[in-house]
Amino acid sequence: MEFYEPVRPDKMALLFAYTCPHCQNEVVLVSPTQAQTVTCGACRATFPIYPVDERVVQYVHIMLADGKAAVDPSY
């Protein structure tokens, strides 16, 4: 059995949860910065979403060094 050192993240993603207006299922999307229509995985209904502000997403990525600072506080 080989032993590997833990691997640090190279990048990060921001997840945003939207509640399906038809069945209340949670639909999770990765940083949806464009207005779009999504399909619920549970009931297959579609609904439009509000996009998130791309500047906010960029800010969080910069502040957390694309995920590296979340693992190493001295980063």
Image (tube, rainbow, N blue to C red):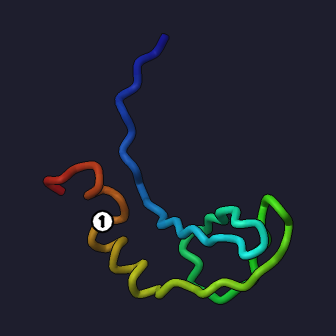
Q: Inspect the image, locate mark 1, and give the three-letter code of the amino acid beneath it.
A: Ala
The percent coordinates of residue 70 (x first, y second) are 29, 55
View extreme (right): residue: 44
In terms of image quadrants, where is residue 26?
A: bottom right
Q: What residue do we see at 18% from left, 53% from top?
A: 73
In terms of image quadrants, where is residue 50?
A: bottom right
The residue singled out by tag 1 in the image is 65
The one of 6 and 23 positioned closer to us in this rendering:
23
Q: What residue do we see at 66% from left, 65% from top?
A: 27
The one of 66 and 49 positioned closer to us in this rendering:
49
The mark total stands at 1
In the rendered image, the vertical position of residue 9 relative to residue 25, given as above or below: above
Q: What residue do we see at 36% from left, 64% from top?
A: 66
| The C terminus: image quadrant | bottom left
Q: What residue do we see at 30% from left, 65% from top?
A: 65
Q: Residues within 10 Å of mark 1 (few under 14, many from 20)?
A: some
The percent coordinates of residue 42 (x first, y second) are 80, 59
In the rendered image, the vertical position of residue 3 relative to residue 46, given as above or below: above
Could you tell me which secondary element the residue under label 1 belongs to? helix
The percent coordinates of residue 3 (x first, y second) are 41, 18
